[in-house]
Amino acid sequence: MLPALARAIAGRPGIVLAVTTLLLLPGVLLGGGMAERLRHLGFTDPAAESSRAAALLDRAMPAARPDVVLVVRAGRSVDDPAVAARGRALTDRLAREGSLVAVTSYWT
């Protein structure tokens, strides 16, 4: 099937160009102003985990915008004593890293 399609396309370049132009025009006309509208809204997916984390951090710490957000899944509640102990240990270990300016976690 693909070889036959390739022969049909290669044999009629003028028609292919005309059809492509006809299909491109509505896209240009309908989507021409999208970049201007999207610039104000942003290019991030609001349902993405990173977007939800940024919104949570903006509410919890409005003055700080982190460079890195680390999400760790424990399979249990963050208030579980074992999870909290591991979370504090990870926070302490990251805080000792020389290249990090500040480390903040749920448990601090």
Image (tube, rainbow, N blue to C red):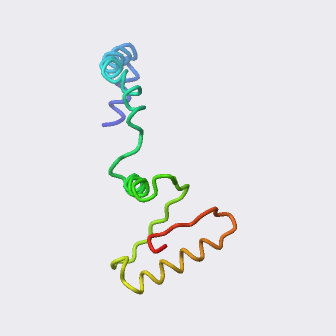
Identify the image quadrant of the N terminus: top left
Residue at 36% of width from left, 53% of height from top? 48
Q: Is residue 38 left or right of residue 63?
A: left
Instruction: Note whether 66 is above or below 105 in the view shown.
Output: above
Instruction: Note whether 43 is above or below 107 in the view shown.
Output: above
Instruction: Note whether 70 is above or below 12 in the view shown.
Output: below
Residue at 64% of width from left, 63% of height from top? 100
Furthest toward the bottom, the residue is 82
Horizontal and vertical percent position of residue 70: 49, 65
Residue at 46% of width from left, 74% of height from top? 107
Horizontal and vertical percent position of residue 26: 30, 19
Horizontal and vertical percent position of residue 54: 43, 54
Q: Quadrant of residue 11?
A: top left
Q: Quadrant of residue 106?
A: bottom left
Observer-nearest of 41 and 10: 41
Observer-nearest of 25 and 30: 30
Residue at 54% of width from left, 76% of height from top? 90
Observer-nearest of 103 and 43: 103
